[in-house]
Image (cartoon, helix red, strand yellow):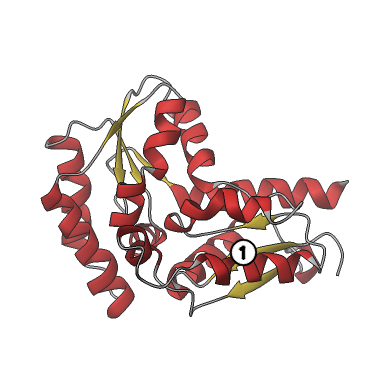
C-alpha cells in the first residue's frame, strides 16, 4: 500500500472507534476507492496514561508507544496520528523516535481556536487528570497568547467520573453530567471557549452533542487535519 498514514490508537478503543467513524464519515467519498488509506494500531493494552503521569511508580506507557512507532515506521507511512490527548505527554519522545511526522492534536486544536474564535481569550480545558496536571493544553494556549482556564477540583472529579466510570468502564455517556461539566466551565470558571481535551469527551460529544456552547473538540479537529493532510498526500 502506498501513500497511507498510521493511527496509533486503542487509548481507549471506543474513543478510537469514534475517531475512525468521523474520519470515514467526513471523507468525501462516492466509491470504495475514494476513502483514505491507513493502518490502525489499536493497542488496547497500553498502560493508562493518567495513572502513570500522576504516579511514576505505575507502568509507563512510553515503551509500548515507542514500539508501535518504530514498528510502523518500517512500513513507510506518510504521517502518524495519535488520537489520545493524554498520550501527547510523550509526544517529544515519540517524534524523536521517527522521521515520520506525528500530528500534534493539542497544537492543532489551539490553532483552530485562534482561527474560529479570534476574539476569545479565556479558554477552558477539560480532560483527564493527567492532561490537566501535565499542562498539555495549558502550554499550547500560553504559547498562543491565550489564558488557560482550568477546572476546579470538583469539576475535574466529575470529568474523571464521566471518562472512567461511565465511558471507559460502562461504554455509556451520562448526558446530564457531560453537559453540566461544560456549563460549569463557562458559568463558574468564565471560559469563553471550552476544549474537549480527552477523546472520551469527544465520544460524549458525538453521542450526546452540546450544540449551544462554543467548543473546541480536539479529536474532531484532528479528524479534519488528518483528512486535509491525507488528501493533499494523495494528490501529490
Q: Nearer the viewer, residue 153 or 205?
A: 153
> In screen coordinates, is 78 left or right of 97?
right
Residue 117 placement (x, y as % from top left): 41, 27
Q: Give me the residue at 16% from left, 60% from top.
A: 176
Indicate the quadrant where residue 80 lies.
Answer: bottom right
Q: Give me the residue at 46% from left, 25% from top.
A: 144
Residue 230 placement (x, y as % from top left): 73, 52
Mark 1, residue position: 24
Residue 64 placement (x, y as % from top left): 56, 72
SS assignment at label 1: helix
Q: Nearer the viewer, residue 42 or 117?
A: 42
Residue closest to the far front: 57
Q: Give me the residue at 75% from left, 53% from top.
A: 100
Q: Can the viewer see residue 44 in this picture?
A: yes
Q: Can the viewer see residue 27 in this picture?
A: no
Q: Nearer the viewer, residue 186 or 68?
A: 68
Indicate the quadrant where residue 1 lies.
Answer: bottom right
Residue 193 placement (x, y as % from top left): 32, 34
Q: Give me the residue at 37% from left, 19% from top.
A: 119
> In screen coordinates, is 150 left or right of 74?
left
In the displayed structure, 115 sits above or below 235; it is: above
Dot 1: within a 10 Å radius of its alpha carbon, few (fewer than 14), some, or many (20 or more) residues?
A: some
In the displayed structure, 62 sits above or below 123; it is: below
> In screen coordinates, is 6 left or right of 51?
right
Q: How many marks?
A: 1
Amino acid at each position: 500500500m502506498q501513500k497511507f498514514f498510521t493511527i496509533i490508537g486503542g487509548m481507549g478503543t471506543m474513543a478510537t472507534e469514534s475517531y475512525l467513524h468521523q474520519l470515514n464519515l467526513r471523507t468525501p467519498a462516492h466509491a470504495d476507492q475514494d476513502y483514505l488509506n491507513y493502518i490502525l494500531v489499536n493497542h488496547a493494552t497500553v498502560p493508562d496514561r493518567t495513572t502513570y503521569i500522576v504516579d511514576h511508580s505505575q507502568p509507563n506507557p512510553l515503551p509500548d508507544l515507542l514500539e508501535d512507532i518504530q514498528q510502523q515506521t518500517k512500513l513507510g507511512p506518510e504521517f502518524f496520528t495519535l488520537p489520545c490527548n493524554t498520550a501527547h505527554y510523550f509526544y517529544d519522545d515519540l517524534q524523536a523516535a521517527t522521521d515520520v511526522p506525528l500530528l500534534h492534536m493539542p497544537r492543532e486544536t489551539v490553532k483552530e481556536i485562534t482561527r474560529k474564535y479570534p476574539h476569545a481569550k479565556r479558554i477552558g480545558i477539560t480532560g483527564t487528570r493527567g492532561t490537566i496536571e501535565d499542562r498539555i493544553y495549558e502550554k499550547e494556549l500560553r504559547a498562543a497568547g491565550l489564558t488557560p482556564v482550568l477546572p476546579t477540583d470538583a469539576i475535574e472529579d466529575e470529568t474523571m467520573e464521566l471518562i472512567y466510570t461511565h465511558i471507559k468502564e460502562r461504554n455509556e455517556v451520562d448526558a446530564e453530567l457531560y453537559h453540566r461539566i461544560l456549563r460549569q466551565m463557562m458559568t463558574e470558571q468564565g471560559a469563553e471557549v471550552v476544549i474537549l481535551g480527552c477523546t472520551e469527551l469527544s465520544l460524549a460529544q458525538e453521542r450526546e452533542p452540546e450544540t449551544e456552547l462554543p467548543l473546541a473538540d480536539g479529536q474532531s479537529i484532528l479528524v479534519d487535519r488528518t483528512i486535509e493532510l491525507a488528501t493533499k498526500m494523495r494528490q501529490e
